[in-house]
Image (cartoon, rainbow, N blue to C red):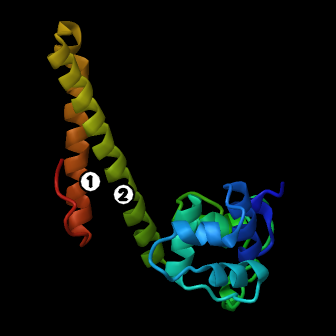
Amino acid sequence: MTDYRSETSVGARIKAARRERGFRTTRELADVIPGGNVTRAVLENIESGRKADISVSQLLNIARGLDVPVSMLLAPIGAPSSELDLPNLSDDFTGMTAAEFDCWFSATPLSSYQPRLASEREDIATLNALRELATLRREIDRLRLVRDVGKSSGDSELASDSGLEDRLQSVEREVTRLAALLMSAGIAEVGAP
């Protein structure tokens, strides 16, 4: 079976991913994608290469239907040093590898992609701060759950674990700091823990 991540066009990657995910036909995949903008005919045209310009909503719906990261459909990530193979892009993308594209697309810091402008670096830093904030909030939820389970189960050792409380307070302080930083950068509704 072909690895969809190494295919040389968006349509070929979608077709191979569809098959890897167990969808034998385009109709089977279209049936699990709500919204109506991805039909069997649309999928057949994309997979065959007859439809090269895919709308953002179609691409996102297909990626969700296949349960694959959208960047894996956009670039041949399985061959990271190969050139980006998307049609109709500006010359700015000429020579960009699949790995560089993924770093640019996902705003990955300290990667092979180097932002050209300070404003782009700031945007990448903001995205990464938002990701870190989400990770820290999940950690707060996890720590509170561990503490609450310890209390409700009668586990006095876990319920009185000062290390757990210290860690929880430390993460809560970091969330507050990060939220304030993001709010000062103009990101609304990040709030404290």
Residue 59 rendering spot, x and y as whole percentages = 57, 76
The circle drawn on residue 55 is none
Q: Which mark is residue 129?
A: 2
Q: In terms of image quadrants, where is residue 22?
A: bottom right
Q: Position of residue 79 (x, y in %)?
A: 79, 61
Tell me what residue is drawn at x 80 percent, y 72 percent: 8
Disc 2 + disc 1, Cβ < 8 Å: yes
Residue 75 spot, x, y in % from top left: 69, 70
Q: Amino acid at mark 1?
A: Leu
192 relative to 131 in the view: left or right: left
The CA distance from mark 2 to mark 1 is: 7 Å
Q: Position of residue 178 (x, y in %)?
A: 26, 53
Image side of residue 98 versus residue 161, left or right = right
The residue under the point 72% across, 87% down is 87
The residue that mark 1 highlights is 178
- Comparing 108 with 37, the one in front is 37
